[in-house]
Amino acid sequence: MSHEPARASAIADLMRAGREMSRLSMVFRYAIAGRLGLTVSDLECLDFLADAGSATAGQVARRTNLTTGAVTSMLRRLQQAGYVTAERDPADRRRVIVTLRPERAAELERPYERFAEGTERLVEGYSAEEVTLLVRHYDRMQAMYRAELDRLRGDDT
């Protein structure tokens, strides 16, 4: 007896679960952004800056998949709201370096705290091998997303 039907069924279940997790992740991001009075793009920008420390406006545009004009407006809004600072790059005066204000980082983390605690509890139940598999899967999925975003932007020439 072949195991192929069981494998095909398991793969279909994985794909369904992945789509639902992706959908719920987006709904969750919109809910958090709304609670903070931000747009999802604002939140993506601030999350990126929290990880990166600081970035150029061009790097923010690439990460959020927004035009440089849209990023300029967003950064001006976030600067006026006190979330970021924007300074001219001393090495290249044409570039602007944007940095998340550290005193605002905690309020951006607060809506995620309960979810992060639940995630930690969930992962505690996984073996090292299972965690390694998940990391490898997420890394590969991220690479696929990046490649598709490049293709959609026309960067695949």
Image (spheres, helix red, strand yellow):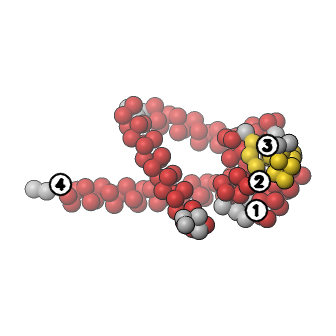
Q: Residue at x 82, y 36 (%)?
A: 103
- Distance between the Cα atoms at labels 2 and 4? 51 Å
* Numbered tag placed on residue 99 in the rendering: 3
**Three-letter code for the amino acid on which mark 2 is drawn:** Ala
**Three-letter code for the amino acid on which mark 3 is drawn:** Thr
Residue most extreme to the right: 80
- Distance between the Cα atoms at labels 4 and 1? 51 Å
Residue at the spot of label 2: 57
For marks 2 and 4, give the one nearer the viewer. 2
In depth, the one of 26 and 99 nearer the eye is 99
Q: Earlier in the sequence, mark 2 or mark 3?
A: 2
For marks 4 and 1, give the one nearer the viewer. 1
- Above/below status of 127 relative to 149: above
Q: Quadrant of the N terminus?
A: bottom left
For marks 3 and 4, give the one nearer the viewer. 3
**Residue 105's quadrant in the figure?**
top right
- Distance between the Cα atoms at labels 3 and 4? 53 Å
Residue at the spot of label 4: 3
Residue most extreme to the left: 1
10 lies left or right of 99: left
Q: Position of residue 60 (x, y in %)?
A: 72, 53
Q: Residue at x 85, y 42 (%)?
A: 90
- Within 10 Å of the Cα at label 3, are there few (<14), some (14-19), or many (20+) other Cα atoms? many
For marks 3 and 1, give the one nearer the viewer. 1
Q: Position of residue 72 (x, y in %)?
A: 81, 59
Q: Quadrant of the C terminus?
A: bottom right
Label pair 2/4, CB-CB below 8 angstroms: no
Q: Residue at x 79, y 36 (%)?
A: 102
Residue at the spot of label 1: 68
51 lies left or right of 124: right
Q: Earlier in the sequence, mark 2 or mark 1?
A: 2
